[in-house]
Image: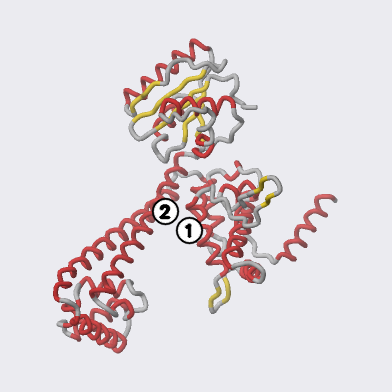
Amino acid sequence: MSHFLNDFVIGIDASSEFSIVAMLAPNGELIRKPFRIDHSPAGFHKLLEILKKEEERLERKPIYFVESTGIFHLPLFFFLKSNDFKGFVLNPLCVHSTKNIDIRKVKNDKNDAVAIAKLAKYQDIKVSIVPEPQILALRMMTRDYYTYSDLLTEMKNRLCTDLYLLFPGFVHVFSGALGKTALTVLKNYPSPRAVKEADIETLTSLISQTSRHGTKWASEKARKLQECAQLSSSLPSEFSLLDAKINVHIDGIESIQASINGIEAQIHKMIESNEFPVEARRNIELLDEMPGIGFLTAATLIAEIGDVSLFKSPKAFTAFFGIDPSVNQSGKFKGDKIKISKRGTRFGRRVLFTIAMACIRTTSKGGLNPVLREFYTSKCVTKKKKVALVAVMHKLLHYIFAVLRDQKPYELRKPEDHQAWRATKIREAVA
């Protein structure tokens, strides 16, 4: 049974410039026709006056529910919250599941607002928790970081594609096809013709200073570049008109990289500020100490998780990241090709994948996490590599949950050592 069955419930369907509001009385009747409010000071205060008027008439304080629509619902949500109204955010998956309750196929904002109000009033659904403003701001910044990182990768791929056409062989000259040295050379010599006509000593000096390698190494690279430039002379002369694209891509790469550096600096500044929650900062520090997790990945995880105390068990924590299995069973049929649900935060999954890859990777000094590396290897005996990797991600979530729940640093233990430690703790508790 719903916890809000006898309450004065408000359903809000939010968009970028306006919202549609529907109000249900405690007895379930629609108080008035759903109405529109603009996302402006006048629109917000209009809604505030209506809510206060109905609150006096019904002698019940309204509880509002709004469907999560990216960022568009947040201004109105926080405005009502600042005026001492209680509110919740609904997952769009829950809201969309009610669209076929009525037989008629009618889809509009007014019906959606009523559906949100009815869903909250009559169904026992789980609501989404909006984190503290500081955590929400950190979440937006970390997500921007990964968005710009994807843009940087896309821009580099475009530059690589053009180089394969206009400057064959260039991407194989340096170990980092588009590293600092390669980009510096392209910025100073943005066409095969410019490289071919360049003074070999000047080119060698530029490569040596940028890469911090010796003259002999730089001279060899300069010679290879001029050989590649000579090869490009067989291309149609009309292709030289495309040389300007190289400069355009380099400018784009530098601009995006500067934005990424600025975002990363702002994330550090935000976490170190006095306004940032002390508990969240402590959680970031705890995760940062775990093998395979750096400062940025730790900040991203805490920004996505929010308050870990909201998760009652590791199972719920795993489901939040979408690593839980999706079940497909009907009648006598039971699906055996189980996939992860991917219902949770995709940014959290992305970071978790990166951490898992780091933990199972081996180096000359050994693995970052030999326990997880051994676990991954054992799983690969009977499972595919990606299935084994998901198992590592699942185990990592249990580690992270335990660290945040117990507020203790991560300890690297083999399974048998952990079982012995746990048995000791149980005996001590019983005694």
Residue 140: x, y in percent?
A: 41, 46
Per the image, the residue denoted by label 1 is 295
Q: Quadrant of residue 376?
A: bottom right
Residues packed near mark 2 inside 10 Å, few (<14), some (14 to 19) or many (20 plus):
some
On screen, residue 178 above or below 298: below
Name the outermost residue toward the bottom.
216
Mark 1 in CB contact with mark 2 (< 8 angstroms)? yes
Residue 413 - label: none
Which is more toward the observer, 278 or 387? 387
- In this picture, residue 304 sits left or right of residue 415: left
At horizontal 84% and vertical 50% (from top left) the residue drawn is 430
The residue under label 1 is which amino acid type? Phe
Per the image, the residue denoted by label 2 is 268
Residue 11: x, y in percent?
A: 48, 26
On screen, residue 293 above or below 330: below
Q: How far apart are labels 1 and 2 at the CA level?
A: 9 Å
Which is more toward the observer, 210 or 389? 389
Which quadrant of the figure contains the N terminus?
top right
